[in-house]
Amino acid sequence: MTNESFDRRAGEGQFGLYDQSVRKRENAYTGKYLVLLDCQEEERGMAALRSQAGIASAEPVRGAEAESAVRVFGAPDVNALFPELGVAVVDVAPDQREALVTAAQQEPAVIAAEPERLVYISTITDRTPEVTGYYPTYRSDEDVLERHTTAAMAVSLGPAWDETEHTWGLQAVRANHSPLTGQGVGVAVLDTGVDTAHPDLTAHIAGTASFVPGQSAQDGNGHGTHCIGTAAGPAQPQHGPRYGVAPEAQILAGKVLSNQGSGSDGQILAGIAWALSQGAKVISMSLGAPVGAGQLFSPVFESLAKRVITAGTLIVAAAGNDGGPVNHPANCPSILAVAALGKALDVAPFSCRGQGLVGAEINIAAPGVDVRSAWPMPQVYNTISGTSMATPHIAGIVALLAQGAPEATASELSKRLLSGAYRLAQPPASVGAGLGQTP
Amino acid sequence: MTESPRVDVILSVDDPGRFAETIGAARAVGLTVTSEQPLIGTAAGTIAEDRLPLLRAVEGVAAVERARAVRLPPPEPPDR
C-alpha cells in the first residue's frame, strides 16, 4: 500500500487513527456463550451441558493449532473447547439459554457461563464499560449488576455517620483525628452574641462586645451561640457528641446582629475592627445580604479585608442561603466564601453559587446541613442548617492551622486551607476547592 | 425646597494613617459619623442624600456605599 492510497482512504473516513470504519455497538453479543470449566473436570462439565441444555459436543483446540481453531470457529454446529484454558465456546440457541444457565448453576464442574461479546479495538474515545441492561446470562452477571447498583446507591447516600462521639461535621472535616486544638488562637465570631452562661463555652470566652444599640452581647437569638459552638465548642461537652472544631481556641464573641437576627454594615465594620484589636487570627461571619446577578462586591469591605489580611487575620463568611449569587460581604475577593454541604457531601440546595464574577466565587465548603451545636440555656443544644453552620467549621480549621503554623501569615493560612481541602465531585462554582480539612 | 433625606453610609479611606484628617473633611461636607474604625480605615454614618457626591469627592475617601441591612437566618427555623 502506498502512502497516497492510505491517505486517501483515511480522508474518506474508512480508516482513521481510531478505526472509525467500525461502528461499535454497546452490549453486542455473538449469540455464542463462553463457558469456564473446572480444568480437572472438563469432560464432566461439557457432559452436563450436553445432557441438560442440549449443547452440541465440543472439539478440542490446542493453543498451537491456529488453523484448527479457524476451522472450528468457521464450522456450523461445532463448538470449541480450549483444554489448556478450561474454556469452551458453544453455540446456544435462544431457547437453550435458560437451560444452559440452570445447568451451569447446578453443575460444579461449570464455574461460569456468559454470552460471548463482540469486541473492538480500544480507542481513547471508548467509554468506561457499564452494565446498562439485562441479558439472560449466568448469575455472575447478576452479581455485577447488584454491585453496580449498590455502589451507585452508596455514592448517592454518601458516607455513613455515627454521631455518638462526634458530630458528622467534625468527622467530615476530620477534626476528630487532628492532634491540634486551637489552643491560644483567637477566633472571633461576629453574630448575635453568645450565651455567656453556656456550660460548654464559658471556659473559653476571652472577650465579648456588642455593637447593637440597646442590647448586650448576651445571645437572645441562638444563632451566635450555635456558630461559636461549632468553631470552638469543647472536646468533652456536657451532653452528646463533640461538636467544636477547635476546642481550646479563645472565643471572641462580637454581637453585630440583633436578637432578631439583623444588623447593618456599620455594625459589622465595628465588629471587625474590634476583633482585630483583640488579636483574632480568624473572623467568622455567618451573615450576609443578598446581591443581584452581576452586582459587584463592596469596595469598602474589600479594602478593609485586605487590611485585615495584612494585619495577619483571615475573614471567612457565609456564601448565603438563597441559592443565588454569593452574598455580600462573602463576595469580596479577600473574604473566603463558604458553601454548605449535606451529609452525602453534596452541596446543599440552598447554598449560594459562584457567578463567574471576580470575588463572587465559592472558595471552600463545609458541613452545613443538620449541624448540632450549642444553643442558649435552657435548651443547651440545637440542630440547624445553613451556610451559617458551614462557616464556623472553616473558622475552626483556620484556628488549628494557625496553631500548627504560628508564624504563617493570613495569606499563607488561606493557601494552606484551600490546598488542603478534600476535592469533591461537584463543580467549583458550588464547592470551591472542596471540603475543608483539619491539619 | 424640601430637605434631602438622610441615608446610612459606610466609607473607607485611602490611608488609615491620615484617618482623622479624612474623616474631619467628611464631617465638613455633612457626614454625621456613627462609628469609626481607624484600625481598618472605615467609618459609618449618615448624610443627606444629595451630599453623597460631595462625600465621594473628599480627598482621602476611597469608597462610599449605602449601608446594607445584613442578616443570615438558617434556611430552617430552629426547633425550639
Image: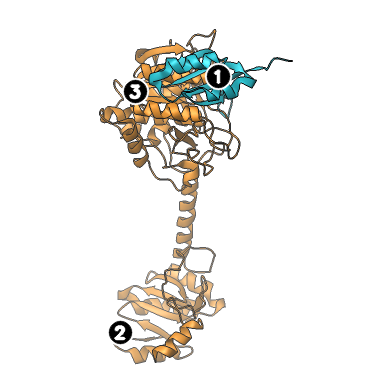
Disc 3 marks which residue? A247
Quadrant location of the C terminus of chain A? Answer: top left
Task: Give above or below for A75 relative to A339.
Answer: below
Amino acid at the residue labelled 3? Pro
Residue A65 position in % (x across, y down): 31, 89
Residue A160 in which image quadrant: top left
What hue does chain A carry in this figure? Answer: orange
The chain containing the residue under callout 2 comes to A
Q: Is mark 2 on a helix, strand or loop?
A: loop
Disc 2 marks which residue? A63
Q: How far apart are marks 1 and 2 (CA)?
A: 82 Å
Asked whether the residues under marks 2 and 3 belong to the same chain, the reply is: yes
Q: What element carries label 3?
A: loop
The answer to whether residue A81 is left or right of residue B10 is left
Pick whichever of labels 2 and 3 is earlier in the sequence.
2
The chain containing the residue under callout 1 comes to A
* Pointers 1 and 2 in contact (C-beta within 8 Å): no
Task: Give above or below for B30 relative to A426.
Answer: above
Amino acid at the residue labelled 1? Gly
Amino acid at the residue labelled 2? Gly
* Closer to the eye: label 1 or 2: 1
Residue A104 position in % (x across, y down): 44, 71
Residue B26 position in % (x across, y down): 52, 17
Residue B59 position in % (x across, y down): 48, 23
